[in-house]
Amino acid sequence: MFFQGFRLNSKILKSLNSGYKFKLLSGAALATSFNFYYQNSYNAKIQNSIEPFIEHSVTVDKGVKDIETQLKFQDGTLWDLLAYSVRAVTFLKFRIYALSIYSTAESIGEIDAFFTTNSIQKVDLEESVIVDLLEKKKDIEFLARITPLRNTTFEHLREGMIRSAMSSKEAKLEPEAMVNAVKSFREEGMCRNGSVLVNDDLFLLKNKDNTVTIYHYDNKLQKYNFIGKSSI
């Protein structure tokens, strides 16, 4: 599996550089290892856009609704779109879900301050850098939005996230911490069973207190449902 070319918001990220090694996150990595990075095993490809997101929404995939470039979520906080892509299974040649990454203006400022060299024309997916970011900037906030391209279930998404996270470098370096994170994720975080339909959304919010809160948006009922909250 891999993520097809990411489009980045160059207006928001304009001060970041070729050393900008921000892995933005796969849904798997956020939810289970709780680090915002792409797993190297995805062979993620990133294609940078030199244009800012000036539109109000973007088309991530024709199979799902357009995604807002600015999202007002729950408590009224505004979240700006940083990047988006689609997760695909290469050998079966089908797409699984659209992934959109958001952050707040305050957190984007902290990220900008963390990466300060050259210009963002190339992105190096180095896991250790994003781990370093999270250790030094624990209060940054991110919002991952997963929008299925085909009907699926909470169980399928959850176990896929866990498998991907368990294959990460961080999991091998700190196996006990990973086991505890997975246990918390299963029992307290994404603990619901049932269907997640096309055009529904699964939101994974990395909070300032280093917890992850999970919500499901039922597109048919146009209703947010709290799923769970787990520690990182």
Image (cartoon, helix red, strand yellow):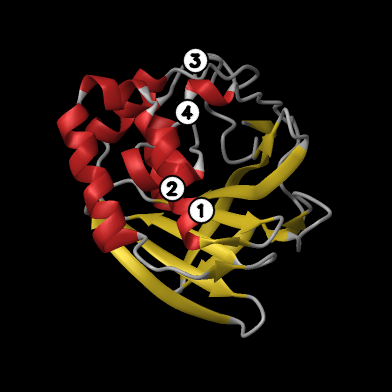
CA gap between label 2 and label 3 equals: 32 Å
* Tag 2 near tag 3, CB within 8 Å: no
Task: Give the percent coordinates (x, y) of residue 223.
Answer: 54, 82
Tell which tag, 2 or 3, sits nearer the viewer: 2
Kindly report the distance in space between the C-alpha atoms of the residues bearing marks 4 and 3: 9 Å
Near mark 4 (Cα within 10 A), the count class, few <14, some 14-19 or many ≥20, is many
Res. 232 visible in picture: no
Q: Say what secondary structure mark 3 lies in.
A: loop
Rendered location of residue 176, percent (x, y): 15, 32
Q: Are marks 4 and 3 in contact (CB under 8 Å)?
A: no
**Three-letter residue code for mark 1:** His
The Cα–Cα distance between marks 3 and 1, rounded to whole angstroms, is: 35 Å
First in residue order: circle 3 vs circle 1 = 3
- Residue type at mark 2: give it: Glu
Residue at x 25% of width, y 41% of height: 138
Residue 12 in the image: state x and y as whole percent. 58, 41
Q: Is mark 1 on a helix, strand or loop?
A: helix
Instruction: Provide the residue designation for mark 1.
Output: 156
Which mark is nearer the camera, 3 or 1?
A: 1
**Which quarter of the figure is the N terminus placed in?**
top right
Q: Mark 4 points at which residue?
A: 22
Mark sitting on residue 19: 3
Q: Nearer the viewer, mark 4 or mark 3?
A: 4
Q: Is residue 209 above or below residue 176?
A: below
From what the image shows, is residue 25 above or below residue 193?
Answer: above
Q: Do the residues labelled 4 and 1 touch (CB within 8 Å)?
A: no
Which residue is identified by label 2?
159
- Mark 1 surroundings within 10 Å by alpha-carbon count, few (fewer than 14), some (14 through 19), many (20 or more): few
Residues at badges 2 and 1 in contact (C-beta under 8 Å)? yes
The answer to whether residue 226 is above or below residue 95 is below
Q: Nearer the viewer, residue 15 or 82?
A: 82
